[in-house]
Amino acid sequence: MTPGNDSSSGSGPKIDIAILGRYTYLATEIFWGAIAFALLRRAGALRRAAVTILALYPIAYVWDRYTLAVGVFDIKLRTGIEVAGIPLEEHLFMAVVPGLVIGMHETMFGTGDDDTHDRSDTR
């Protein structure tokens, strides 16, 4: 059986995303980061997203460092570059994921104005 062609799963051939080797995780984060950026820019929410991401980052960093230290994740397809004790790609992940979530939300429901907020539903 060839890698990525596990016919026992019933879903047919798989795409080999590991073709980029040690740059696979980095390329994935850049790809999804570009989509997040485009969504946030389109929704006019770059500034608000940046504030939220910066607020969440310390929590995500501590949790990520812990989970990597205890062996929850073993990231093989990465560059090997570490910043502050965790892989470079993990730092990007901690910005990309909330960026995508906020970008999707703001694209669907946002006001489209980065300087004002629709707070009519908050009391």
Image (cartoon, helix red, strand yellow):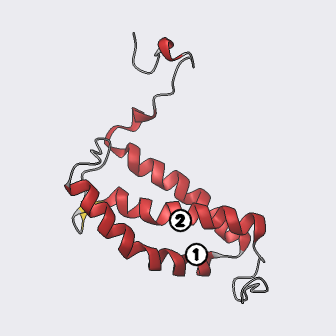
Q: Which residue lies at the image location 53% right of the left edge and 59% below the top edge?
A: 33
Which residue sits at x=39%, y=38%? Answer: 20
Q: How crowded is mark 1: few (under 14 residues within 10 Å), some or many (20 or more)?
A: many
Whole-percent x and y of residue 43?
72, 71
Q: In which quarter of the image is residue 36?
A: bottom right
Name the residue located 28 percent from the left edge and 48 percent from the top edge.
Answer: 72
Numbered circle sitting on residue 63: none
Q: Do the residues labelled 1 and 2 touch (CB within 8 Å)?
A: yes
**Residue under label 1:** 49
| Residue type at the position of mark 1 | Ala
Total numbered labels placed on residues in the image = 2
Binning the other alpha carbons within 10 Å of mark 2 as few (below 14), some (14 to 19) or many (20 upward) gives some
In this rendering, would 82 be left or right of 39? Answer: left
- Indicate the secondary structure of the residue bearing disc 1: helix
* Closer-to-camera residue (19/54): 54
Q: In which quarter of the image is the N terminus?
A: top left
Residue plotted at (32% across, 64% down): 63
- Residue under label 2, please give it: 98
- In the rendering, at what x and y percent does residue 3 appear? 39, 19
Q: How far is mark 1 from mark 2, CA to CA?
A: 8 Å
Quadrant for the C terminus in the image: bottom right
Image side of residue 120 versus residue 35, left or right: right
Q: In the rendered view, tell whether residue 118 sits above or below residue 58.
A: below
Dot 2: element: helix
- Name the kind of residue labelled 2 in the image: Pro
Instruction: Decide: is 17 above or below 112.
Output: above
Residue in the foreground of this view, choosing between 119 and 16: 119
Image quadrant where residue 37 sits: bottom right
